[in-house]
Image: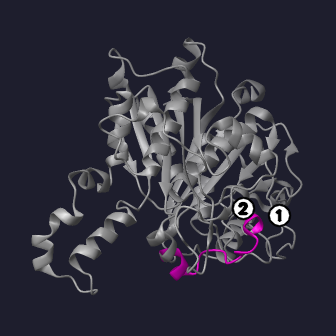
Amino acid sequence: MKKRRVAITGLGVVSPLGNDVQSTWHNLLDGQSGIDVIKQFDASAFPTRIGAEVKQFTPAAALLTKQNRFAMSFTHFALDAAQQAFLDAGIMPTRQDADRWGVVTGSGMMTAEFEYLHRFQQACAPDGELDWQSLQNKSDGFYQLVDFGKTTSNSGLSLLIQQFGIKGYASSVHTACASGGQALGLAMQVIRRGEADYMLAGGFDSMINPLGLSSFCLLGALSGYNDTPKTASRPFDGTRNGFVLGEGAAFLILEAWDKAVARGATIYAELAGEGNTLSSYRITDSHPNGDGAIQAIERALKDAGVTPDAVDYINAHGTSTKMNDLSETNAIKAVFGADAYKLPVSSTKSQTGHLIAAAGALEAVLSVLAIRHAQIPMTANLTSPDPDCNLDYVTEGPREKSLGVVLSNSFGFGGSNSCLLFKHPAFEEVVA
């Protein structure tokens, strides 16, 4: 049976490079970095003191409703990015079609703010040991009614549904760094199955807080280049020593292709394929030979009915960790063979940092914009090439190139792998 085509008609972003799509894209191509010394809290005692923070963000007054005014900061990023996407698409759920709208979000693992945990410790465990009597007697000192709504894992999803009046399919994905990519893949499948005609899909996250930062520091996953934050993220570079923690949100409006065409919508690209695998080699590492990632890329190609030689660019996961960059490089070599060395690859995390659950969604937006503008963003800070990472990583960007097919990789902790395949809106006509 012929697959239902899926159009991308709206984009929205809140990122370390800008609080909308236009500024994020402009600053990316301009070579600017969203990475700096952490300013949200005093990180001076941490081994890593840098991050890619969202800057000068103020929630829109229209989005500060009774339901979401107490939401965590990254949920406000999500609401803003989602509204941008709706406005860009020029379509919203209505009373007549709200049940044909769905939403899938890639959500973060931090469901409790550090400030809440600190209140709990001060009231009930001031000496480090939990005092159950204090817990019972002093609950009013640390627990507030809004804390329950803020700390449930689906709170962001619920607020998006309430805010925009979505009444159809709804789900939340958490597969670490693959969350945003897998959310988009699931949303595509929902439209293909006919369960919805329109989907809001993307991701949002922030782990830039004392708990999140300390967790990644203990794993040894973060870059220690504190004195040179703007060049600390160095994907595929021989001197790379870890990723840079970021935050933000990105959402896309997906539509059944015939619906988008019928209403005369601007179609940025077609979401034509996805590959979703689980390798489970280690909690924090991908297999050095690219296993898992290889299968994800191959499945995305097969799902879209595209041969490897048709791919024009890969937006890499490219975290700037020793193992991940090597694994991804080997996966690309395994899938594309000799052509891998001629295929442009770049990692935008070199400028945005790693947005964890939002990473795949942001990089999907950037992949779509690369197609629309025929420009490939560069891999910044790659100045001392790793001899084992020897592909065309686009170090001079932006590189002008007409793009018919673009892949976007997202590989998460725990072995979750996502690969999305995007086509130029006219790709099918050109091939035909």
What residue do we see at 34% from left, 27% from top?
Answer: 165
The residue that mark 2 highlights is 332
What residue do we see at 22% from left, 56% from top?
Answer: 144
Q: Is residue 363 visible?
A: yes
The residue that mark 1 highlights is 391
Name the N-terminal-most of marks 2 and 1: 2
Image color mode: one colour
SS at badge 1: loop
Q: Quadrant of the C terminus?
A: top right
Q: Tell me residue 266's x, y (percent).
A: 64, 21
What residue do we see at 55% from left, 12% from top?
Answer: 262
- 29 left or right, relative to 37: right
Q: Tell me residue 364's x, y (percent).
A: 62, 45
Q: Is residue 85 above or below residue 148?
A: above
- 210 left or right, relative to 243: left
- Marks 2/1 in contact by CB < 8 Å: the verdict is yes
Nearer to me, 328 or 64: 64
Q: Tell me residue 368's x, y (percent).
A: 68, 38
Marks 2/1: CA–CA distance: 9 Å
Amino acid type, callout 1: Leu
Q: Is residue 342 above or below residue 192?
A: below
Q: Is residue 9 above or below residue 114?
A: above
Amino acid type, callout 2: Ile
Magenta span: 215-231
Q: Tell me residue 267's x, y (percent).
A: 64, 25
Nearer to me, 9 or 419: 9
Is residue 229 one of those drawn in magenta?
yes
SS at badge 2: helix
Q: Residues within 10 Å of mark 2 (few under 14, many from 20)?
A: many
Is residue 234 one of those drawn in magenta?
no
